Image (tube, helix red, strand yellow):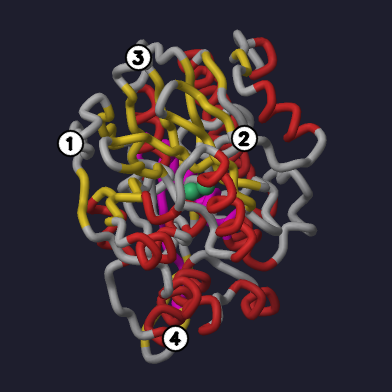
Amino acid sequence: MTVTELPRITVTGHLQKEAWRVRELPPVELVRPGLWSIPVIFPNNPLRYVNVYVIEVPGGIVLVDAGWPVDEAWANLNEGLESIGFSITDVEGVLVTHNHADHLGLAGRIRDASGAWIAMHELDAREVDFDVDPEIFKRAGETWLIKSGVEASDMPSLIIDAGQFVEFAKIPKADRTIVDGERPLPGATHIRTLWTPGHSPGHVCFIDEKNNLLLSGDHVLPRISPHISVHPREHGDPLGTYIDSLNAMLGMNPEEILPAHEYRFSGLDERIAQMNLHHEDRLAEVLASINEHPGASTYEISSKLTWSHGWENTQGMLRRAAMGETLAHIVHLDRRGLVRNQPRDGQMHQGELVQTDAWFPAALS
Ligand SMILES: [Zn+2]
Ligand SMILES: [Zn+2]
């Protein structure tokens, strides 16, 4: 069975889909009475834009997600709000699906302009609410790269520099945290929080019970599957967590899914089946690679997998992200008892002995 043989989703955001095809920013749309979508640009990124959702509440509006922190996206948001009869000062709060900068970045500027609160799940709030020394951050990254078996020649291009860290540290902190099942809007109690960890530890979706809609953030998108990664700040088995929170949605049957990127659609169960198959295929590919190269490092395994633009063209931060994604699959195979780690060598790095992960099929000993 291939993904194309599975039942398909139905695109409902026709204007968004058409805009995607012609590479334009989709229009502002009234999705349901009192609920709009405003696309804001996500420059230099293949996702192109973020769908900010506007929920009308007594006396104002609340946004779901905010957008990437650049002037152009800020202009898109302000013009979008004006076009539906509101202004940025009407924003009472920003519900953030997760702490990635394309969702949270602009929230600080919105808060400055309107006094709005920013809310997100505690696990994601905690991650941005810290003051880490850029040197410690950089060192943790280098240790992770050594552990992953990165070739010395490739090392410099994969290190996050202090400048990027400073940008990261500018991400706004939350004023309030939300938990699974919470109805965060007293004036709009039909909006319920659903904790869906995986893409980030504290990722949440919002369910609009009145209209039977799912505001899915990055958890479920119509075309691509969200990036799931094990990296210096993400431990555990995020892929397993993701698959579990995806399958927990089976049978929910929302009338329409409102994602943070791409376009609206219906057919949640169909989309879940497609994504499960995608991950099983990828897990099988990773396992085959480990069977073929027992003792390979995360870096070596990554280099042998198929990538949409080829491994050679996957450079810098994309390569680092690709390694994180590979590691998420390996860790999940480990949790399933199919592979095991037997770290090798040991290299001194800034006074610390760092061993390289070496992955073996569980059957071999
Ligand atoms: Zn994200
Ligand atoms: Zn996103």
Mark 1 and mark 2 lie on one chain; the one further toward the N terminus is 1
Q: What's the CA distance linking mark 1 and mark 2?
A: 30 Å
On the image, numbered disc 4 is attached to which residue?
348
Label 2 CB-ligand 2 distance < 8 A? no
Q: Amino acid at mark 4?
A: Met
On the image, numbered disc 3 is attached to which residue?
252
On the image, numbered disc 2 is attached to which residue?
262
Q: What's the CA distance linking mark 3 and mark 4?
A: 51 Å
On the image, numbered disc 1 is attached to which residue?
186
Q: What's the CA distance linking mark 3 and mark 1?
A: 24 Å
Mark 4 and mark 2 in contact (Cβ < 8 Å)?
Answer: no
* Neighbourhood count class around disc 3 (C-alpha, 10 Å): few under 14, some 14–19, many 20 upward: few
User: Which quadrant is the N terminus positioned in?
Assistant: top right
Mark 2 and mark 1 in contact (Cβ < 8 Å)?
Answer: no
Mark 3 and mark 1 lie on one chain; the one further toward the N terminus is 1
- Horizontal and vertical percent for residue 61? 35, 42
Q: How many circles with numbers are drawn on the protein?
A: 4
Residue span colored magenta? 321-346
Q: Amino acid at mark 2?
A: Glu
Mark 2 and mark 4 lie on one chain; the one further toward the N terminus is 2
